[in-house]
Amino acid sequence: MAKNVFKGRSLTVIEDLSIDERRYFFRKCYELKQAAISNDKAKLDEFRINDKDFGIYEVFLENSTRTKESFRNAANFHHAKVSELMTSSSSINKGESYADTFNMLTGYDNSIFIVRSQVEGLCRWLDDESADYTRRNNLPVKPAFINAGDGKHEHPTQELLDEFTFLEDNGMDFSNIHVALVGDLYHGRTVHSKADGLKLFDKVKVDLVAPPELAMPENYLEKMKENGFEVNVYSSIEEYLSGNHDIAKMWYFTRPQLERMGERILQKQDILRESITFKKDFLDRIPVGTKFYHPLPRHKEHPTIPTWLDSTDLNGWERQAINGMYVRIILLAIIAGKVGDDYVAPEKEEKVVADEDYIVKVDVSGKKNEKKKVYSEGVHPIENGIVIDHICRGDRPDDIRNHMRLISSVLNIDSDRGGEWISRGSDGAYKGIIFRPGEYELTRKDLKRLAAVAPGCTLNVVRDGKIEAKYRMHMPPRVYNFDDLSCKNESCISHPSQGENVPALFYRTPDGHFECAFCGKSHGFKEIWKGGKN
């Protein structure tokens, strides 16, 4: 029998399950739901963990009713051991570290932790940390972590139930989807999860309907485009319904969280709410067969889907909420290994990928007899030392100066002799030059730091007035293991203000940014350093 690829897996972001794995997952959800509707008890028992010693622990560090109770009922379906951490009396509120708290609970024979928190990337970190803890203490099983929502980052289990509901209304067809996302797209982690989640479908068209103040954050918008989605942007429902374009038959609403945005936004809250609230006047302008969805709960005074719509055929949100339990039953079942033995992963072509060389050494052997280079605008050649050239080419002089100070600090050469200079090329573009006379032996780690803090620059190592070595620096595919790195998102588990001493880790994105591995925040290369700009 093939190994169950789901057993013991964590779900910290929606991408933790591949597209093919999710398609299998939803087929199992459909089987379960049909068995429940027909009250086929024998079939239902095929999905149960049915082990009173299997430990499932709910840790909700942020208030929740819908997610918490659906997980509790899902766990009860499995006849498993269900525990809850009472955070109101927990030492977490006294400054106890998350790692210590969850490691302690891991030692008490718990197999799955369901965690909701305002701290973004918490489950990703706990998943890594618990692996080390389990190994150090020779525990038989590493626990799995399920992200039940982390700040403005993701809500992968909500994404699963949303996708399952879309699929039901799509005839379980994965070929295409056209959906409008309406409401607070800035704060809504449920819509942020869709930037990757909708890759489930072969062809995706997304209409984003929100005023600029509540618009989808740029990094998620770019991710949608990188994933091949057709993306259209509208500032209100009125504008969306007035244009000469296709209107989606699936509308996904979110609750505006204006209270998070300060007094300036609150002063215009009525205008903002009106732009994303459905009105009776719109009924004859939407396509026949349209369905509305909402992660619930709605705002009781200002619902974007008014309650008079509850009894109409537009109502897809109630079935969506009911689907939450089916989806979470299957999620617990596959992590426990009860479901998944019959999954066969698609065959993949094995590709040998060479390590990317982002530090390119230039052959200078044919240039030994060249004349000494005289730098423009007053920078004199040095006999021995290093010259870092082409820094931040095309930026403004003030920005280049500021960044050269950061480069000097990152390379620990800010107290050495030498200086910095702003030069201007024949094309009018400015660039920075750092020169330091003396004897320098730069290690591979030093070169990696320079590539991360100044991609696009050139490093010249000078000996006896000649260039002995020359390197061109490109943006690394990932940056890690440097103490002076820092995500700028204060809600991220890796931010110093969280006090967890989580080492920062960044991955390069296709559009030339660095994305935090924990919270997903996008940074420019100047921003990932503790001394860098916010």
Image (spheres, rainbow, N blue to C red):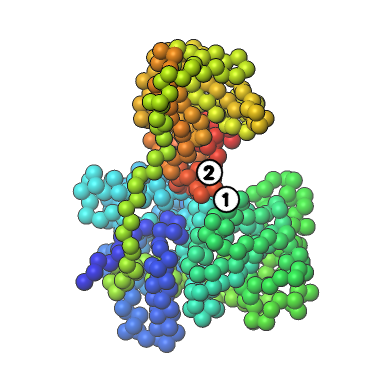
Give percent across and percent down for residue 23.
42, 71
Residue found 71% across the figure and 76% down from its top: 286
Amino acid beneath label 1: Asn
Instruction: Inspect this view and state whether residue 440 appears.
Output: yes
> Looking at the rendering, which quadrant does residue 226 occupy?
bottom right
- What percent of the width, then of the height, locates residue 257? 65, 55
Give the side of residue 130 with respect to residue 452, left or right: left
In the image, residue 3 above or below residue 410: below
Element type at marker 2? loop
Against 389, residue 43 (above or below) is below
What residue do we see at 55% from left, 13% from top?
A: 380
SS of the residue at dot 1? helix
User: Which residue in the protein does label 2 denote?
Assistant: 513
Q: Which residue is mark 1?
A: 219
Along the horizontal axis of the image, is 78 left or right of 528? left
Label 2 neighbourhood size at 10 Å, few (<14), some (14-19), many (20+)?
Answer: many
The image's mark for residue 19 is none
Q: Position of residue 175 (x, y in %)?
A: 51, 74
Decide if residue 411 is in sight here: no
168 to 440, vertically: above or below: below
- The foreground one among 522 and 372 is 372
Task: Sort mark 1 into few (<14), some (14-19) or many (20+) by Cα contacts within 10 Å.
Answer: some
Residue mark closest to the camera, 2 vs 1? 2
Quarter containing the C terminus: top right
Image quadrant occupied by the N terminus: bottom left
The Cα atoms of the two marked residues, 2 and 1, are separated by: 10 Å
CB contact under 8 Å: marks 2 and 1: yes
